[in-house]
Each structure stands twice: as structure tokens, then as C-alpha cells.
Amino acid sequence: MSKSKEIISNTFVQVFGRATLALMSVVTLKLLTHYLSVEGYGNYGSIYEYLALFSIFADYGLFTIGVREMSEKDDKDHIQKVYSNLLTLRLILILISMGLAILIAYLIPQYRNTPIPAGVVLASAFVMLTLMQGGVSTILQYNLKMFWVTVANISGKILTLGVIAVTIYFIYPQNPDKGFNILIIAGAIGALLTFMITFFAALKYTQVRLGFDFTYWKHLMKRAAPYGIAIALSTIYFKFNITMLRVMKGETDAGLYLVPMRILEVLNVVPLYFMNSILPTMTKMIKHGQKEFNRVMQYCFDFLSMFGIPILIGGYLLAYPLISIVSSPKFLTNLKTGFLGSDIAFQYLLMAMIFAYFTGWLTFTLVALEKQIKLLWINLASVIFNIVLNLIVIPVYGFRGATLASILTEALVMILAFVMILKIKPFKINFGNFWKIIFAGILMGLVVYFGENTFGKFGNIGIMALITFAGGIYGVILYMLKVLRKETFRLPAEKNI
């Protein structure tokens, strides 16, 4: 199999897995939003968003830098050395970050007399297992064998969903307060299964053991530091909105913002999975000259545009029915009462998503160029911008202000990263396919706009059928416009990489 086919295959396996997980997440979200009040779901989501702020320090960018380190020398001993020491560093960072998260949760005044501190303790087990699973899966990403990670994730999610359903329908069907902690524990149970499957899959490619080469630790930490801190800052401005909403406006605004965020978290994995898959190849191709660099940049731009544009257009038009599918009526806009719901937040956040797609491409390019330090300054500026903007708009506009801050922050990161790369290594992009993708997206949007009433008569199934139909139309148009063809996504100089 050619390298480009391996990359796309590996990406699609992960996207397919994520799509399957998304369907289960929809069911989970539906169960939780019906079982818990808006305030209760706000507390539930706030626990995980709070822990996410600490988990980024445990990640430290080691996954991406680890894959890059492995790709530098095709030697089993070298790969084992990178892998083992990476696992040890991640474990140490996990224990430190989760310990701090638990301690600080009990010190935050706004969390007192709420289920959040105890929930943080319980949910930290889920986060620790998930982060270690990510570390173990590094070797699978390097070998482009993420199929096993997909199997592990789906299996763990099924188990989690099962525990949640049993809690809601059989253990505490009428008492959400008592069932709350079990809902948190359900995530840890599923994460344990996910970790075990990934662990045994990794054994097929190398030994899963800890490494204690302190000199190499220093090398890894030094190399990962700029990217790790940049990722931390990036996650802060993406996740900190929830914490600020929870503290400044309360559980209701946090709950309304969290529902579309759960959908966006699924959609945002496309650039992450794709760029993680292409990173080793991109790193090697950069060394082959400007022509190959232009080609790989075009390859990434076309691929991400092809996915991002239809999601933006279709998601914006179908925001209300989509939020209705994944939540309950109490989360939806009611024009009669003047209540603005999660569907409005979703429309705004889709704009942030499309910027995030291109931001992911550009930030990974900086990593491939070994300019991680540039990301640090870009994301530091963005965090300051985001926090200041949130402090201004959240008290006045609530969750709508938080969405506006997300849009402007993602746009700022994209612009800064683009300018930085042009200064380091200029490249050229042909917008021919992009305009064709826009045209196809508009035609698809017309199908969605005029078809919503007809398909909507059949309820949620009708909306899903409309999405499938419109997606098919979009694909056919791209094929007719010759955007979808073998040459479009064939990497150059594959025999050399």
C-alpha cells in the first residue's frame, strides 16, 4: 500500500471510529440531558472540562513529539527507547497533574456545596486511564495501525454507555442526585477496558515497558516543551470558556454551551487524526525541497477543506434539529419566551471549528519544521486575548459571548500561524479545488435548506437521512468537478519516503 493510501486509510479508520463513538455519544448525551437538569448537566460537564485543563499538562505534547522522534530513525532499538521513556514521563506527569486538580477543586469557593469536587476525584481515574492509553497508542500511530485503538475506544464506550443506561433506568431512575456519582464512575470503567485492549494491541509491535534513561528524559522534555506548552495554552483558550461560564454565569449557561461543544469535540478530531497520520511523512518530505513541501501543504489544505466546508454549511442550517437529536427541548431556543438555547451556540461554534481545522494543519506544520517554540508565543498571545475577551463578553452575553471569544481566538491563531510559516518556509497554495469545494458546499446547502421540511416530517430519522442524502450529493458534485480523483490526494515522491 502506498504511503498516501496508508495515511488516508489510517485517518479514515480513526474518523470512522470517531463517527461510531459520536453516535454512542449522541445516545449518552440524550440520556444525560433527559435524566439531569440543565444545572445538573452543567455540573457534570464542568467536572470533565475542569480536568481537561489539567490533563493538558500531563499530555505535554508527548504523543505528537514521540511519533516525530520515532520517525527520525527506522531502528527498533531507537523506537523502543523513545516509546518506553515516553510512557514513563507521561505517567509521572499524569500523577502530578491529577493530584493538583483534585487539591485545587476543593479550594475553589464556587465549587463548595456542589457535586463537583467529589466528581473530580472520581473522574480523575477516567482521565488517568485515558491519558495512559494515549501514550501506549503512540506505537500504533507510528505504525499507522490505529484500527486497534478504534476497537478499544468503541468497546470502552459501549461499556460506559451500558453502565449509564443501567444507572438511569434501573438503579436510580427517579433520583438523579444519587445517580450522579455513578454516572461519573461509568467513564472510568469504560476507560479501563479501553486501556487494556490498547495495551495488548501495542504488544504486537514492541514491548510496553517503562524506561528510565534520565538523559533522554531531558531531551524529550526539552524538545516537547515548546509544543506541549503551546498545546496547553491552546486547550486553555478552548476549554477555559466552560470554567469561566460556570463561575461567572452559573450552571445553566455552562450546560447550554456544553451540548454543542460535545458535538464540536467529535468534529474537531478530523484535522487532529489526519495531521497525526501525515506528520511522519510530512517531516520527511520537508527535507526533499520546496516542490514537495508545496505539494504536502496543498494535500493537507484540500483534504481539510473538503471535510470542513460541508460540516460548516450543513451544521449551520440544521443546528436546531441536530441539537434536538442529541439533547432535550429544555436546551433548545424558544422564540416565544426569548430563550436562546444550545442551537444558537452551535451555529456560532461552527465558525470557530472551520478556523480550528486550518489551525490544526498550520500548527502541525510548525512541529514538522521543528519550530514548536513559535507555537508557544502564538498560543500565549491567544490565551491572553481569549481570557480578556471572555472577561468582557461573558458577564454581558453569557454563552453567546463565550462563542464569540472562541471564534475570534481561533481566527487569531490561524492568522498568526500562517504568517509565521510564511516567514520560515514560504509555500504556495492553489485555490482551484477550494473554490470548487465552496461551490459544491453551497449546492449541498440548498439541498439541505429546501429539503429540511420534507425530511423533517419523519423526525430524527428523516434528518439523518437528509444529512446522508446531502452528503452524497456533495460527493457526486466533487467527483463531477474532478476534485475527487486519485491525483488529488497522491503524495509526491512516495518511493523516497
Image (spheres, rainbow, N blue to C red):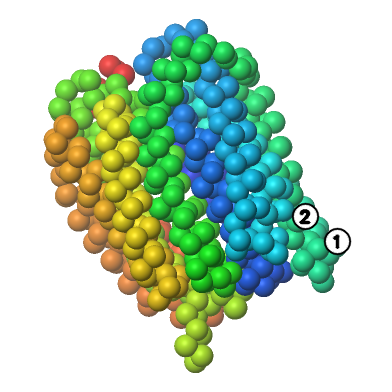
Would you identify the image quadrant in which residue 153 lies?
top right
The picture places residue 176, in percent across and down from the top left corner, at 76, 67
Percent position (x, y) of residue 315? 41, 65
Residue at horizontal 47 percent and vertical 54 percent from the top: 239
User: Crowdedness of circle 1 by 10 Å Cα count: few (<14), some, many (20+)?
Assistant: some
Q: Secondary structure at mark 2?
A: helix
Residue at x 72% of width, y 53% of height: 118
Horizontally, residue 210 falls left or right of residue 263, namely right
Which tag is nearer the camera, tag 1 or tag 2?
A: 2
Q: How many marks?
A: 2
On residue 182, which mark appears? 2
The reply, left or right, for residue 265 in relation to residue 186 is left
The residue lying furthest to the bottom in this view is 336
> What amino acid is labelled 1 in the image?
Ile
Distance Cα–Cα, label 1 vs label 2: 10 Å
For label 1, the SS is helix
- Front residue of 210 and 496: 210
Foreground residue among 200 and 381: 381
Residue 438, percent from left and from top: 25, 59
Q: Is residue 83 left or right of residue 132?
A: left
At 26% from the left and 24% from the top, the residue drawn is 285
Where 148 falls versus 17 (above or below)?
above
Residue 408 appearing in the image: yes
State if disc 2 and disc 1 touch (CB < 8 Å). yes
Which part of the image, by quadrant, shows the C terminus? top left
- Label 1 sits on residue: 171
Of callouts 1 and 2, the N-terminal one: 1
Give the image location of residue 346, x and y in percent. 44, 67
